Protein backbone atom coordinates (compact mmCIF):
# COMPACT_ATOMS: atom_id res chain seq x y z
CA UNK A 1 0.00 0.00 0.00
CA UNK A 2 1.59 3.27 -1.04
CA UNK A 3 1.92 6.01 1.56
CA UNK A 4 2.44 9.69 0.75
CA UNK A 5 5.40 9.87 3.15
CA UNK A 6 6.85 13.07 1.69
CA UNK A 7 3.57 14.98 2.12
CA UNK A 8 2.99 13.39 5.52
CA UNK A 9 6.39 14.57 6.73
CA UNK A 10 5.68 18.19 5.87
CA UNK A 11 2.18 18.20 7.37
CA UNK A 12 3.17 16.71 10.72
CA UNK A 13 1.59 13.29 10.22
CA UNK A 14 3.32 10.44 12.02
CA UNK A 15 2.98 6.85 10.89
CA UNK A 16 3.95 4.06 13.27
CA UNK A 17 3.87 0.39 12.51
CA UNK A 18 4.73 -2.48 14.80
CA UNK A 19 3.84 -6.03 15.72
CA UNK A 20 1.13 -6.82 18.22
CA UNK A 21 1.45 -9.46 20.95
CA UNK A 22 -1.26 -11.56 19.30
CA UNK A 23 -0.63 -14.67 21.39
CA UNK A 24 -2.08 -12.87 24.38
CA UNK A 25 -5.44 -12.55 22.62
CA UNK A 26 -5.47 -15.90 20.84
CA UNK A 27 -7.42 -17.91 23.49
CA UNK A 28 -10.19 -15.31 23.60
CA UNK A 29 -10.39 -15.09 19.80
CA UNK A 30 -10.53 -18.89 19.46
CA UNK A 31 -13.35 -18.98 22.02
CA UNK A 32 -15.27 -16.35 20.07
CA UNK A 33 -14.74 -18.29 16.83
CA UNK A 34 -15.95 -21.52 18.44
CA UNK A 35 -19.00 -19.77 19.84
CA UNK A 36 -19.81 -18.27 16.44
CA UNK A 37 -19.70 -14.75 17.84
CA UNK A 38 -17.29 -13.55 15.19
CA UNK A 39 -17.04 -14.53 11.53
CA UNK A 40 -13.59 -14.08 10.00
CA UNK A 41 -15.02 -14.56 6.51
CA UNK A 42 -16.54 -11.08 6.44
CA UNK A 43 -13.12 -9.60 5.61
CA UNK A 44 -12.42 -11.78 2.59
CA UNK A 45 -12.80 -10.13 -0.76
CA UNK A 46 -12.70 -13.22 -2.93
CA UNK A 47 -11.73 -16.88 -2.98
CA UNK A 48 -9.87 -18.37 -5.93
CA UNK A 49 -7.81 -21.41 -6.82
CA UNK A 50 -4.14 -21.79 -7.60
CA UNK A 51 -4.90 -21.98 -11.32
CA UNK A 52 -6.39 -18.47 -11.20
CA UNK A 53 -3.66 -16.99 -8.99
CA UNK A 54 -1.37 -15.42 -11.61
CA UNK A 55 -4.13 -13.20 -13.00
CA UNK A 56 -6.17 -12.64 -9.84
CA UNK A 57 -3.29 -11.60 -7.58
CA UNK A 58 -2.51 -8.74 -9.95
CA UNK A 59 -5.92 -7.26 -9.19
CA UNK A 60 -6.27 -5.11 -6.09
CA UNK A 61 -8.47 -6.56 -3.38
CA UNK A 62 -8.43 -6.21 0.38
CA UNK A 63 -8.25 -9.89 1.43
CA UNK A 64 -7.98 -12.54 -1.27
CA UNK A 65 -8.05 -16.17 -0.16
CA UNK A 66 -5.99 -18.56 -2.27
CA UNK A 67 -7.01 -22.22 -2.21
CA UNK A 68 -4.37 -24.77 -3.08
CA UNK A 69 -7.03 -27.47 -3.22
CA UNK A 70 -10.68 -26.92 -4.18
CA UNK A 71 -11.74 -29.38 -1.45
CA UNK A 72 -10.67 -26.75 1.11
CA UNK A 73 -13.49 -24.42 0.06
CA UNK A 74 -15.98 -23.89 2.86
CA UNK A 75 -19.38 -22.33 2.64
CA UNK A 76 -19.86 -19.00 4.46
CA UNK A 77 -21.29 -19.21 7.94
CA UNK A 78 -24.98 -18.36 8.16
Image (cartoon, rainbow, N blue to C red):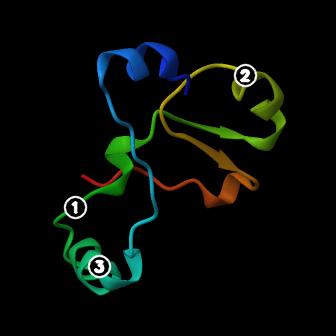
Q: Is residue 44 left or right of residue 33?
A: right
Determine the secondary structure under disc 2: loop
First reached walking from the N terminus: tag 2 or tag 3: 3
Spot occupied by residue 37 in the image (x, y as percentages of width and height): 16, 66
Spot occupied by residue 54 in the image (x, y as percentages of width and height): 83, 29
From the image, tell me which residue sits under label 2.
Answer: 58
> What label sits on residue 38 in the rendered view?
1
Q: In this view, does 8 lie to the left or right of 25?
A: right
Mark 2 and mark 1: Cα distance apart in space = 30 Å
- From this view, report whether residue 10 is shown above or below residue 25: above
Mark 1 and mark 3: Cα distance apart in space = 14 Å
- Residue drawn at 46 percent across, 64 percent down: 19
From the image, tell me which residue sits under label 3.
Answer: 25
Q: In this view, does 63 lie to the left or right of 12?
A: right
Classify the position of the N terminus by image quarter: top right
First reached walking from the N terminus: tag 2 or tag 1: 1
Kindly indicate the quadrant of the structure image that contains residue 42: top left
Spot occupied by residue 51 in the image (x, y as percentages of width and height): 83, 36
Amino acid sequence: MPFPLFQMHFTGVTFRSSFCATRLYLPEVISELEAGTIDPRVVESEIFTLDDAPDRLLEQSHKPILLFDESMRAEPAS
